Amino acid sequence: MSAAVVVHDRERGRVVLLRRGAGARFGAGLWDLPVGKCEPGEPVTRAAVRELYEETGLRVAAEDLRLAHVVHAAPGVGSAAGFLTVVFVTERWSGEPVNREPGKHEAVTWVATDALPAGEMVLSTDRMLTRALGGPAGVSLHGWD
């Protein structure tokens, strides 16, 4: 299981995205949300807080996370085992985004919500953002036909 966080600056109409580096195991060269796997015994909210900080330097409190979306991909879609990603949104954070993992990411930056890089995002990121920015929480299923 993994956790992703949408940091939404509603006042300025922007979100934090990262661009995966050329050597990334998944989504090389594509824009994505800060996301990462849960450690054994780690609740998904703690993983979201930890991964956001590890990748972007932004700090959030677990109680400021709101469920936005769940993505469940079947085995063979995105990875041999499939995946489950729980997506949270927050409008409260501290710090400014920085690329804390330059070996994995090319950039970490604010992106205007009305200028998202369509066609250049990792699978489901567009739907995750739509849900986080105002749509009802939902579930995306991939490869379960």
Image (tube, grey):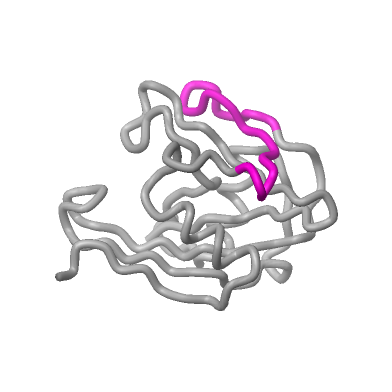
In the rendered structure, the answer to whether residue 115 lies left or right of residue 82 reads right
Q: Please say if 97 is above or below 49.
A: above
At horizontal 43% and vertical 69% (from top left) the residue drawn is 70
* Rendered location of residue 75, percent (x, y): 17, 58
Q: Looking at the image, which is closer to me, 57 or 116?
A: 116
Q: Quadrant of the N terminus?
A: bottom left
Q: Looking at the image, which is closer to me, 143 or 56?
A: 143
At horizontal 46% and vertical 49% (from top left) the residue drawn is 36
Which residue sits furthest right?
Answer: 11
* Rendered location of residue 132, percent (x, y): 60, 65
Q: Please say if 55 is above or below 3.
A: above
Q: Please say if 104 is above or below 26.
A: above
* Rendered location of residue 66, percent (x, y): 64, 71
- For residue 53: magenta? no
Quarter of the rendering containing residue 23: top left
Q: In which quarter of the image is the C terminus?
A: bottom left
At horizontal 46% and vertical 52% (from top left) the residue drawn is 125
At horizontal 48% and vertical 42% (from top left) the residue drawn is 118
In the rendered structure, the answer to whether residue 51 lies left or right of residue 77 reads right
Q: Looking at the image, which is closer to me, 22 or 129?
A: 129
Quarter of the rendering containing residue 41: bottom left
Residue extent of the magenta highlight: 98-115
* Rendered location of residue 103, percent (x, y): 48, 22
